[in-house]
Image (cartoon, grey):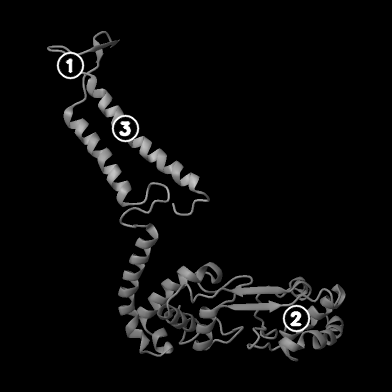
Amino acid sequence: MSDFFSDFWSYYIAAIALVGIVWCVWLLFSQRKITKSAGAADDTGHVWDGDLRELNNPLPRWWMWMFLLACIFSVAYLILYPGLGSYAGVLGSSTQGELAAHRQAAEKTQHEIYARYLKMDVKQVAADADAREIGQRLFLNYCAQCHGSDARGSRGFPNLTDNDWLYGGDPDTIQQSITKGRNGMMPPFAGAIDGKQAGDTAQYVRSLSGLSYDPIRASRGESTFKTTCVACHGSGGKGNQALGAPNLSDGVWLYGSSEGSIVDAILKGHNGHMPAHEEILTPERIRMLTAYVWGLSNNGGVGQ
């Protein structure tokens, strides 16, 4: 409760807690005034079913002591631990601190597990059955949300099980992608070319990957491609991994191969973001994840 917008709410919460305890103690001692007369109990006058009477007996002594001890325990707890608004408690305990301690203990234990793989080449790690199991769990926790549990991706998210890579599929490049992330940018050309030119260019792009196309429109689109797109995708549409520009001639499409999808990409552009994980995962985990991802499309699919 250390993130209140003002001190008022801290005092408000503290007051509610303390007043509640004081009221419970008052209620307890106020009931001690009820005493049992010799040989009879006070009758409230409430009768049910003919002879079922409600009596006003004093509280049992053992129950009163338990109630009082509970109130004393509550006060002691609020002194030692957080509970009175933004007061941190004498012991300075916090859920963040407990989480950090548990995480540190877990990482110490896990470091011993990962240590055996630090001396191994990434490709050797990918071939190890235990390492693949660890890598798969990491993948499901941190990567499956975008790339899918089977790593085959979806629209806008690359398939990691084939050999088509935007930035390269060697272990070092994969590790760099996981660690630092990627920002792929396909700029929009709506201001440079019109819809007709974009459609013709889309026909030419389809021809590069062996899809059905209109030869006349494709011939017109070729000139636009060579003046607008060649800088990133190359004259033959083979792409450029240094820029993350995809290969347009291999039949693998990140956003779809229809004319409409290609026209949208040309006119509106795309902005793909792969988040960095260096602040989330330890270097050992990133290396284990790298081995798993590399193994998905290598070693005969040992990563699957």
Q: Which residue lies at the image location 42% right of the left edge and 47% below the top edge?
A: 85
Residue 17 in the image: state x and y as whole percent: 38, 40
* Residue 252 in sight here: yes
Q: Amino acid at mark 2?
A: Arg
Task: Say if residue 256 shows up in the picture.
Answer: no
Report the label total. 3
283 relative to 180 in the view: left or right: left
Dot 2 or dot 3, earlier in sequence: 3
Q: Which residue is mark 3?
A: 24
Indicate the quadrant where residue 194 lies. bottom right
Q: Which mark is residue 206?
A: 2
Amino acid found under the numbered disc labelled 1: Lys
Marks 1 and 3 sit apart, C-alpha to C-alpha, by 23 Å
Kindly identify the residue that appears in the image at 49 percent across and 77 percent down: 278
Mark identifier at residue 36: 1
Which amino acid lies under the numbered mark 3 shown in the image of this protein? Cys
Q: Nearer the viewer, residue 214 or 59?
A: 59
Query: Do tag 1 and tag 3 residues touch (Cβ < 8 Å)?
Result: no
Picture coordinates of residue 268, whole percent (x, y): 76, 71
Could you tell me if the residues under marks 2 and 1 are in contact, i.e. CB atoms within 8 Å?
no
With respect to residue 185, does 76 lie above or below?
A: above
Secondary structure at numbered mark 2: helix
Secondary structure at numbered mark 1: loop
Label 2 to label 1: alpha-carbon separation: 97 Å
